[in-house]
Image (cartoon, helix red, strand yellow):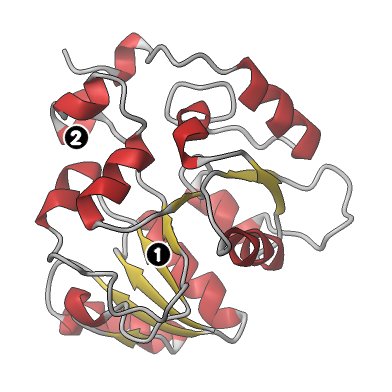
């Protein structure tokens, strides 16, 4: 597939490495000029581009940036993708630690629903709760005992593509329901930051509470 990745931090950079290694055509961008990603491009074979061009003709788009920076993305930034291309977002809202207050999220809008509204496109939430080093190093073949599982929340026909991609990266995909249910994997929930297998992920999602823990609410 042709994959556009907007954001080259821990998760975006790791996905660039992993997806390029799987043979996908990866274009990656950050908030600066493509030249600032020269080392990552040389290492992986990915093509560094401007953020506005990352999604052009892509079969799948990944948005992996700090939550506070989402409104600054160019309008229609994912609109240049191919028809039906799923958009994955890996973001988390850290109001005290990084992002400041976002009123809609504080009022109860799930983080990924807010992202979808900001970028004007449906999204699938995945990769937000796994430690980046584990994403890089702990993928194993399907059928391996205790294989780490990752929840995927979102709606629409592109979901199977996302589930298959998680599997190809070495993790068991777990359908976590609609985007409206994506709060079940936000920071502070039982599944967040854990390396559960598929049964463990399902149990943790079921145990989640919509009440945001104090450390993940704006002060």
Quarter of the rendering containing residue 33: bottom left
Label 2, label 1: how far apart the Cα atoms are: 21 Å
> What residue did someone put label 1 on?
62
| 186 up-or-down from 151: above or below | above
Q: Position of residue 31 (x, y in %)?
A: 15, 66
Give neighbour class at mark 1: few <14, some 14-19, many 20+ (Cα, 10 Å). many
| 51 up-or-down from 73: above or below | below
In the image, is 219 to the left or to the right of 9?
A: left
Q: Position of residue 112 (x, y in %)?
A: 37, 42
Between label 2 and label 1, give the one nearer the viewer. Answer: 1
Q: Position of residue 80 (x, y in %)?
A: 29, 80
- Residue contact between numbered discs 2 and 1, judged by CB atoms under 8 Å: no
Q: Position of residue 87 (x, y in %)?
A: 42, 62
> What residue did someone put label 2 on?
98
| 59 up-or-down from 171: above or below | below
Q: Quadrant of the C terminus?
A: top left
Q: Residue at x 83, y 60 (%)?
A: 142
Lower sequence index among marks 2 and 1: 1
Asked if residue 53 can be seen in this view, the reply is yes
Query: Helix or strand or loop: what does disc 1 sit on?
Result: strand
Q: Nearer the viewer, residue 168 or 159?
A: 159
Q: Quadrant of the N terminus?
A: bottom right
| 201 up-or-down from 17: above or below | above
Q: Nearer the viewer, residue 139 or 125?
A: 125
Task: Say which mark, if any, is on residue 23.
Answer: none
Quarter of the rendering containing residue 194: top right
Q: Residue at x 81, y 63 (%)?
A: 141
Asked if residue 92 can be seen in this view, the reply is no
In the image, is 176 to the left or to the right of 142?
A: left
């Amino acid at each position: 597939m042709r994959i556009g990745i907007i954001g080259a931090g821990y998760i975006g950079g790791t996905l660039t490495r992993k997806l390029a290694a799987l043979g996908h055509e990866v274009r990656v961008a950050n908030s600066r000029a493509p030249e600032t990603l020269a080392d990552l491009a040389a290492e992986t074979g990915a093509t560094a581009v401007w953020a506005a061009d990352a999604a052009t003709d892509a079969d799948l788009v990944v948005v992996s940036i700090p939550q506070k920076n989402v409104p600054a993305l160019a309008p229609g930034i994912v609109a240049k993708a191919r028809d039906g291309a799923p958009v994955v977002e890996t973001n988390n809202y850290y109001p005290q630690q990084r992002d400041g207050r976002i009123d809609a999220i504080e009022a109860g809008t799930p983080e990924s629903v807010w992202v979808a509204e900001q970028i004007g496109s449906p999204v699938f939430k995945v990769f937000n709760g796994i430690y980046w080093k584990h994403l890089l190093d702990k993928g194993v073949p399907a059928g391996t005992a205790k294989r780490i599982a990752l929840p995927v929340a979102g709606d629409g026909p592109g979901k199977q593509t996302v589930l298959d991609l998680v599997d190809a990266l070495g993790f068991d995909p777990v359908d976590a329901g609609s985007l409206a249910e994506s709060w079940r994997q936000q920071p502070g929930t039982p599944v967040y930051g854990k390396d559960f297998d598929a049964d463990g992920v399902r149990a943790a999602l079921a145990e989640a509470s919509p009440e945001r823990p104090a450390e993940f609410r704006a002060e």
